């Protein structure tokens, strides 16, 4: 499992540039499904026939947050636009990797010694630039093009019980679906496995994929934040914690999850002695929010993997939460939900 997580998180595929991750995921799932399709937006929609005749959509988004080159100045310094939600304060001194392999690091404009710290504290993408070590515009242009994408430089680290990497959001969801397919024989549901594009820029891929499938039930897999029970002086409004099991989404800014489906999932977890926690998140959203409002509506929830330092190069998860999520899903796909 850790090898799979390493492989998926080391691929750079920000929103709208998912071709590399799409290829890797397709290679992994092809032996275990009846059909693999790629739609017009680039979503993978795989199908595995079940015995019960109802459709269950499992979704994980395969894009990650990143950057897009907008301008290169006469000295070869690069300006980028954020792709997805970034905190500018986290950027200075971070390494990034461009689509064609160039490596650079962020720094920020600051002209006066007395304001150096204040400039850092108020840094925005207006004042951030990327240095790839080029001396001139032409030298930079020989390595990086306008419109080229970039992501955080990948540095996977196995810490024993925990694992740290960029793009755990949401390659961990992708890895869980792949592992589920490896483990599960014939499901009760007809499974539609969606690896969605462009979640980080507005739940784009899941919107069209869910419309095409129009499932009876849907579960999105994504990461969620942790707070005061997990970190020194962590956020008081966030009780989720690494190691306490998958988090059943109750509410975030994109959705109020289906309460009957949540209850059924919690019961299933209890029957099989799988730990779980509940998630009420005061911000953020997942593909579940887009899937829920498709066509005449879809019974939808999200299972979240508690993750520290989301949208940074150091996204950290507990490997037991991953195993427990796979275990829980392997029971869910075999059992009809009666609303
Ligand atoms: Zn995200």
Image (tube, rainbow, N blue to C red):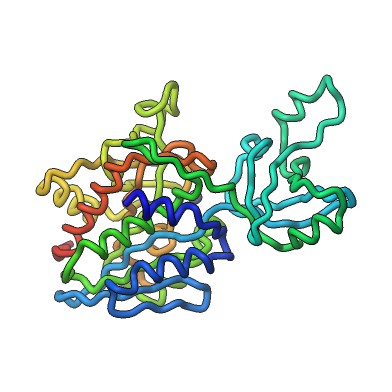
Q: Residue furthest top?
A: 114
| Residue 295, above or below 81 | below
What residue is drawn where x is 19% and y is 74%? 50
Q: Which is nearer the eye, 173 or 209?
A: 173
What residue is drawn where x is 35% and y is 27%? 229
- Residue 14 vs residue 187: left or right? right
Quarter of the picture containing the C terminus is bottom left
Res. 87 visible in picture = yes
How far from the left and from the top, in percent, is residue 48? Answer: 26, 74
- Residue 297 vs residue 150: left or right? left
- Residue 272 vs residue 200: left or right? left
| Residue 274, above or below 330 | above
What residue is drawn where x is 49% and y is 50%? 167
Res. 206 visible in picture = no
Q: Where on the picture, by quarter, is residue 213?
A: bottom left
How far from the left and from the top, in percent, is residue 76? Answer: 83, 50
């Amino acid at each position: 499992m850790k090898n799979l997580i390493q492989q998926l998180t080391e691929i750079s595929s920000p929103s709208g540039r998912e071709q590399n991750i799409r290829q890797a995921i397709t290679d992994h799932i092809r032996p275990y499904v009846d059909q693999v399709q790629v739609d017009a937006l680039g979503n993978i929609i795989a199908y595995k026939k079940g015995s019960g005749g109802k459709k269950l959509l499992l979704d994980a988004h395969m894009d990650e947050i990143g950057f897009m080159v907008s301008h290169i100045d006469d000295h070869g310094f690069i300006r980028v636009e954020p792709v997805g939600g970034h905190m500018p304060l986290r950027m200075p001194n971070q390494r990034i990797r461009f689509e064609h392999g160039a490596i650079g690091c962020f720094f920020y404009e600051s002209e006066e010694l007395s304001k150096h710290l204040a400039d850092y504290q108020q840094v925005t993408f207006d004042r951030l630039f990327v240095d790839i070590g080029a001396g001139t515009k032409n030298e930079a242009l020989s390595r990086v093009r306008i419109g080229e994408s970039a992501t955080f430089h990948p540095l996977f680290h196995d810490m024993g019980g925990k694992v740290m990497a960029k793009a755990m959001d949401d390659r961990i969801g992708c890895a869980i679906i792949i592992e589920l397919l490896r483990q599960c024989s014939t499901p009760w549901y007809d499974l539609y496995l969606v690896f969605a594009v462009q979640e980080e820029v507005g739940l784009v891929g899941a919107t069209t994929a869910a419309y095409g499938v129009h499932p009876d039930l849907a579960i999105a897999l994504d990461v969620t934040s942790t707070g005061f029970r997990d970190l020194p002086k962590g956020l008081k409004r966030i009780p989720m914690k690494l190691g306490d099991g998958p988090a059943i989404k109750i509410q975030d800014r994109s959705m109020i999850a289906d309460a009957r489906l949540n209850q059924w999932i919690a019961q299933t977890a209890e029957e099989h002695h799988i730990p779980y926690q509940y998630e009420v998140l005061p911000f953020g959203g997942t593909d579940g929010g887009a899937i829920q409002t498709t066509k005449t509506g879809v019974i939808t929830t999200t299972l979240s993997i508690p993750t520290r330092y989301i949208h940074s190069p150091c996204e950290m998860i507990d490997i037991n939460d991953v195993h427990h999520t796979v275990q829980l899903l392997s029971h869910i796909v075999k059992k009809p939900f009666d609303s």
